[in-house]
Image (cartoon, grey):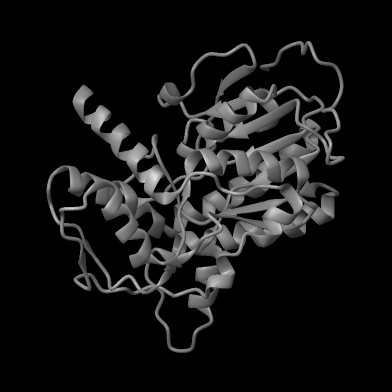
Amino acid sequence: MGGWESPVEGMGVKDQRGTVCMKKAIVSGANGFVGSALVKELIRHGCQVTALYRKGSRHRLADDAGLLLLPFDYAAGDQLTDVINKDDYDAFFHFAWAGSSGEERADVGLQLKNVLWTVDSLRAAKQLGCKRFVPAGSIMEHETAAAAYRQGNQPAPGYIYGGAKLAAHVMCMSVAAQIGMDLVCPQITNAYGPGELSPRLVNTTIRKCLAGEPPQFSAGTQNYDFVYIDDVARAFRLIAEHGKPFYTYIIGSSSAMPLKEFLLEMKSAIAPSLDFLFGDVPFTGVDLPLERFSTEQTEKDTGFRASISFAEGTKRTMEWLEAMEETV
C-alpha cells in the first residue's frame, strides 16, 4: 500500500472563516484536465495530495514533495482500500470518469460503470478516513433533467452522459446519508483553458481560428457559461473547505448569457477579422434559464468568484494551443 509519514500532524487548521483548510486530500482522475489543475492548486496551498492516475497518462503531473502518485484502474477492478493507506484525509475529490467527451458520452454501459465507480469511491472514502467526499458534477445534470421530463422530447445521445452524472449525484446523496459521510457537490458549467485536449467548443473554435477557417455555430440564443480552468480548481478547493454538507454549488463565471455573446467576445479577443457563422448548425439541446447558472450560493458560502474573463481566458488558451502545435 502507498503512503508517507506526514510532517504535519492532525487535521487541517481553522481559517478566518471558521472552516478547515485542507492538509491532506485524495484526488482520483488526477491526470485529467480538471483533476490535474486541482492537484496543483492544493499543493500550492500546502496540502499533501494522494493522486490516483491512469497508467500512461501521468504527463500532467510533475513530481513534488507534497504529491504521492499512485496508478489506479477502476476498469481493471482495482480497489481503493488496497492501494491507499487509511489516514485523516480532509477530502476525497472524485474526477475519474471515462467517456466525458466524444462518442463515449453515449455509451450506456460505460456511463453506468462510471456511476457505480463513483458510489464505490464514496464508500471507500469513508473506509479510508476521509472527512468529506467531493464528486465532480456538471451543469448537464440540470439540462438532462429538463430534457427527460419535457413532454414529447427525444433527448440526444449525449444526454446519456448527463443522465449518468445525475444518477451519480442522486445515489451519492442517498448513500452518503446512509453511511454518515459528509458530501458536497460542485457542478461545473463549462471548463476550458490550457491543458484541455478534448474537441469541445472552445478548443475546436480556437483551432479553426488558428487555421483561418470561419467557425460555424447554432444561432447561439441558448444560455451558456464558461469558466477558466484555474478558477475551476480554486472553486473546488474553496467548496471543499467552506461548502455546507449536502449542498450543491455551481462553478461558473457569474456572468452567464446567451452563447452568441460569449462567442462574439472570443472573436473580438482572438480573431477580430474572421467571420463567425451563426445559424448554420441546428441546436438540439435544452435552453436552461439563466438562474440555473447562478453562482450566488457558491459565492455566499465559499467566497469564490471567477477572476479570469472569457476574453482573457481564450487568449491564454490560444497561446497554449499555438505552443502545442509548434512542438508537434
Residue 213, given in percent of the width and then of the height, sits at: 12, 52
216 left or right of 299? left
Residue 129, given in percent of the width and then of the height, sits at: 81, 32
At 48% from the left edge and 89% from the top edge, which residue is drawn? 151
At 75% from the left edge and 40% from the top edge, which residue is drawn? 241
Of residue 165 and residue 48, the one placed in the foreground of this image is 48
**Could you tell me if residue 200 is visible in this image?**
no
**Could you tell me if residue 170 is visible in this image?**
yes
Image quarter of the C terminus: top left
Residue 94, given in percent of the width and then of the height, sits at: 61, 41
At 70% from the left edge and 16% from the top edge, which residue is drawn? 3
Question: Furthest-left residue in view?
Answer: 212
At 52% from the left edge and 13% from the top edge, which residue is drawn? 63
21 left or right of 253? right
**Residue 48's quadrant in the figure?**
top right
**Residue 231's quadrant in the figure?**
top right
In the depicted structure, whether residue 105 falls above or below residue 88: below
Question: Furthest-bottom residue in view?
Answer: 151
In the depicted structure, whether residue 264 falls above or below residue 155: above
Of residue 44 and residue 95, the one placed in the foreground of this image is 44
Of residue 275 and residue 191, the one placed in the foreground of this image is 275
**Residue 133's quadrant in the figure?**
top right
Image quarter of the N terminus: top right
